[in-house]
């Protein structure tokens, strides 16, 4: 291999590693993320999937008047907009998020018809 070709390959590798470490450092600064929330519904049920950048502890509970499902996610930040609930979803009326404390991301699902 010629030394010019080798220097070119090493230069590309250093550039790629620099980009990798910069992105890795940026991700660490941002912390762990809720990267996407997916909602599918049918007449019989609704499915919700949380895509997160790493495993996390969570707690759930329900509230009444109106009926809500609350999911508290420890040590996560919200990095995307929450999806809009489709108008024909009878089980889920809306979704919103908040921060009950600095370390907890809360996602609240407003529930429609149960059962």
Image (cartoon, rainbow, N blue to C red):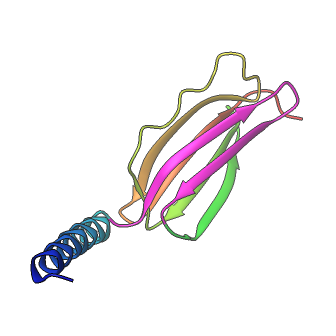
The residue that appears at 66% across and 57% down in the rendered structure is 60
Reply yes or no: does residue 51 show up in magenta: yes
Towards the viewer: 79 or 1: 1
Q: Quadrant of the C terminus?
A: top right
**36 to the left or right of 86:** left
Q: How many marks?
A: 0
Instruction: Please provide the residue range marked out in magenta.
Output: 31-53
**24 to the left or right of 14:** right
Question: In x, y percent, where is residue 112?
Answer: 74, 27
Question: In x, y percent, where is residue 76?
Answer: 44, 62
Question: In x, y percent, where is residue 26?
Answer: 25, 65
Question: In x, y percent, where is residue 70?
Answer: 62, 49
Residue 55 lies in what quarter of the image? bottom right
The residue that appears at 45% across and 62% down in the rendered structure is 104
Compared with residue 87, is residue 73 higher up or lower down, i.e. above or below? below
Towards the viewer: 13 or 43: 13
**25 to the left or right of 76:** left
Towards the viewer: 43 or 107: 43
The residue that appears at 72% across and 23% down in the rendered structure is 89
**Magenta stretch prevailing secondary structure:** strand
Towards the viewer: 2 or 30: 2
| Residue at the extreme front | 2
| Residue at the extreme left | 4
**111 to the left or right of 70:** right
Compared with residue 113, is residue 96 higher up or lower down, i.e. above or below? below
Reply yes or no: does residue 37 show up in magenta: yes
Residue 51 lies in what quarter of the image? bottom right
């Amino acid at each position: 291999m010629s030394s010019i070709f080798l220097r070119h390959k090493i230069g590309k590798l250093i550039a790629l590693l620099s980009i990798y470490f910069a992105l890795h450092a940026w991700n660490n600064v941002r912390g762990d993320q809720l990267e996407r929330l997916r909602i599918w519904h049918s007449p019989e049920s609704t499915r919700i999937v949380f895509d997160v950048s790493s495993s996390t502890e969570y707690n759930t509970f329900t509230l009444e008047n109106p009926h809500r499902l609350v999911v508290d996610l420890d040590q996560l930040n919200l990095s995307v907009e929450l999806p809009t609930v489709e108008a024909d979803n009878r089980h889920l009326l809306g979704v919103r998020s908040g921060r009950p404390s600095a370390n907890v991301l809360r996602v609240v699902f407003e529930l429609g018809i149960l059962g």
